[in-house]
Image (cartoon, rainbow, N blue to C red):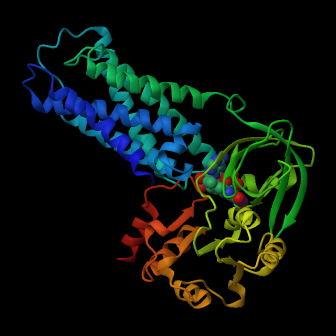
Amino acid sequence: MPLFGLLLIVITTLFPAYQLCSLPNVADQIALFSQYLGLAALILMAWGQILSTRLPGVEAIFGGLDRVYVLHKWAGISAMVAILVHDTVDAEMRGLGRETVLTEFAETLGELSLYGLLILVVISIATFIPYHLWKWTHKAMGAMFAAGVFHFVFILKPFAIGDPAGLYTGVFCAAGLAAYIWMLLPEDMRPSRNYEITKLEQTGGALAITMTPDTKQISAKPGQFGVLRFVGSVNSEPHPFSFSKIGSDGSLRVTVKGLGDFTTGLAKTVATGQGVRIQGPFGKFKLSAKRREIWIAAGIGITPFLAWADALSADAEQIDLFYCVKSRTDAPHLAELEQIAQAKPNLHLHMIVSTEGQRLSAEVITQSTDTNLAQVTVSFCGPVSLRRALQAGLSRYGVTARRFQYEEFEFRTGVGLRRLAQWVLDR
Ligand SMILES: Cc1cc2nc3c(=O)[nH]c(=O)nc-3n(C[C@H](O)[C@H](O)[C@H](O)COP(=O)(O)OP(=O)(O)OC[C@H]3O[C@@H](n4cnc5c(N)ncnc54)[C@H](O)[C@@H]3O)c2cc1C
């Protein structure tokens, strides 16, 4: 995660503390601290809204979209904690003026925003809630933010909206509200390109969909992904998929494994000639191949590596690609990968087939590659449990976190409640 993006959020959230400390004639420091927490919560919520827009500059500042969503989650959780403390520690100050109907209404809206957020944040970290329900509760969070903004504007406070502290937080509120309205717009109003499905093919239990652009194409790099909406399908909700092939003619291919309602039913609902709207490209999982590299793919996690393998130049350093699958018939695009590996002597393909008794571990990697792992870069795409196990194992061979990059096929990551529950049960 780029440090700059993280620091930007931290510094902009801390700045009102300095502004409030500079206010003259404020005796009640505890109430002032509570006032600060209210402002900090609004700024964090505004960042949460901005981070969820998927606008081009967001990835440039905060890193790949998967990391952006992690930041978005923690901004929301931190905002909730700040509001809880703001509500608990009395923020009322003497001599700020007379209560009116408007200020009382603003206070009520502040309470509503607190309890609403509390419920919605708990729901949003519960990853077991089906995505389509979760998505609607998540959208309601913006409404709680809007209630918080109303509270901020009309409540009695030790500074005016036109003062530096009011203007500063006001700018964040305006940006957050604009981001929320942007996210409420229909999907078709967001920047996207029209494609048409030209080929459908089953491969290793997955569906490969090749699409050609109607007019303008997306300039995707190998390893990137798009957010695809299949026009006219029963479920036309946009979903993220990595490009498993980027054709020189502008065509794009995605390979989809049935993992839930939408992806399982996709094969029955799509047809050649059908339109697809693609947002993107997104993602920072890019091919470098400047040094000796190890690529590790598990199951459908092979998709970004397929595009990498295709783009790999003959004079690049040696690459060892470990492809973990249940069985060979269950391995999407295996024949294509074998063909690429035959044509490119610097790409070594290692199949790890679990039904043949093979398991991937740091020891297997070091034995198969016969190289000093401290000198290599590792790229991974697959289940989180395998990533954690391999990352821990490889760190014993000198692979640092900086040298281990990965792509998450999941934006909704939770806060580890399942692992916590498992840990408690184990004891
Ligand atoms: C960056 C990225 C790249 C991906 N690349 C591929 C790929 O190349 N091939 C592939 O088969 N899969 C890929 N996926 C996973 C794929 O997007 C999900 O499997 C799919 O969205 C699940 O949808 P579902 O309705 O079938 O399943 P569900 O059971 O509804 O959802 C399964 C999980 O997918 C997530 N999800 C569901 N709907 C959406 C949505 N509209 N937007 C975002 N997340 C959603 C939910 O968090 C849920 O936990 C990728 C995911 C990401 C984040």
Looking at the image, which residue sits at the far front?
315
User: Dividing the image into four equal quarters, which quarter contains ligand 1?
Assistant: bottom right
Residue at image position (33%, 19%) is 167
Answer above or below: position of 309 versus 58.
Answer: below
Q: Classify residue 86 by image quadrant.
A: top left
Q: Position of residue 210 (x, y in %)?
A: 85, 53
Q: Position of residue 385 (x, y in %)?
A: 53, 71
Q: Classify residue 263 by image quadrant.
A: bottom right
Is 190 placed left or right of 33 in the picture? Answer: right
Answer above or below: position of 23 versus 275.
Answer: above
Residue at image position (11%, 17%) is 94
Task: Mark yes or no: residue 196 visible.
Answer: yes
Is 334 placed left or right of 20 in the picture? Answer: right
Answer above or below: position of 64 versus 85.
Answer: below
Task: Mark yes or no: residue 237 visible.
Answer: no
Q: Position of residue 165 (x, y in %)?
A: 27, 22
Looking at the rendered structure, the number of numbered marks drawn on it comes to: 0
Answer above or below: position of 22 versus 134.
Answer: above
Q: Position of residue 346 (x, y in %)?
A: 71, 77
The C terminus - image quarter: bottom left
Residue at image position (58%, 56%) is 410
The N terminus - image quarter: bottom left
Residue at image position (58%, 89%) is 370
